[in-house]
Amino acid sequence: MRYVFLAAAISAWSTGALGNAFDDCVLEKMPGTTSDLAAKSIKTACLRKSSVQIPEGDLKAITGTVSYVTFGTNPRPGFLAEVRNDANFIVTEITFAVAIETRASQFFTVDTFIYAPPRVMFAGLPPDPTLEMRIDPHSEKRFHFAGTVPDLTTKAKWSWYVASAKGIPNR
């Protein structure tokens, strides 16, 4: 019985793990890394390198809300997004289209998903910078992104949608 279990374990191991392109890249590039900074840089590069365009049909699974706000210690206009990712991708970049009434859309591309609560100051980078660079499948993330839209006020009728996105297929 022990040999059957061992044979099954070896067979499963030899067929390879079902990772994604990001995990494969990290496993390939990480050996020999001798510093935490180098390891974080490798993970960041692998995340960017492994991202592909998410097919248009899958964009409908990226939903949420977007509000026009001011944020930061020197208040500047921008957006507060609360995004739900129900796509089968790890989202690494989103391009939002914002339009006032019937005017042409403006596009804002976001590839770092950071939310800084008002009156809170963070010091230093997160332990793993790639955590702020991704929205995992079947999860939600709240974040700010800068952007100025002329004539956008609280009384203006405006709309938004996800124009495109990049991500890593989740196997």
Image (tube, grey):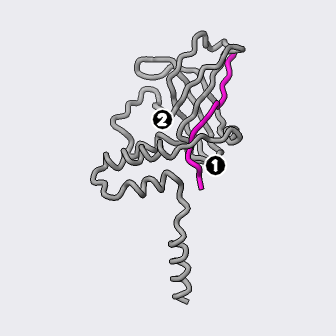
The first of marks 1 and 2 along the sequence is 1
For image coordinates 51% across by 77% down, the residue present is 10
Residue 165 on the magenta span: yes
Residue at label 2? 112
- Name the residue: 46% across, 31% down: 116
Left or right: 49 in relation to 122: right
| Furthest residue in direction top, as rendered | 151
Tag 1: amino acid: Asn
The residue positioned farthest toward the left in the image shown:
34
Estimate the x, y position of residue 17 in percent, counting from the top left.
53, 64
Choose top left, top right, bottom left or bottom right for residue 56: top right
> With 44 as the anchor, is 78 left or right in this view?
right
Q: Which residue is mark 1?
A: 88
Q: Give residue 152's quadrant in the image.
A: top right
> Does the magenta run of residues contain 113?
no
Characterize the local packing of mark 2: few (<14), some (14-19) or many (20 or more) Cα atoms within 10 angstroms.
some
Q: Main secondary structure of the magenta part?
A: strand
Residue 98 picture location, percent across and down: 63, 22
x and y percentages locating residue 159 in the rendered image: 68, 22
Which residue is at 53% across, 16% downward? Answer: 148
Q: Position of residue 81 (x, y in %)?
A: 58, 30
Determine the secondary structure under disc 1.
loop
Distance, label 1 to label 2, CA atoms, is: 19 Å
Above or below residue 25? Residue 140 is: above
Give the magenta part as a residue range: 157-171
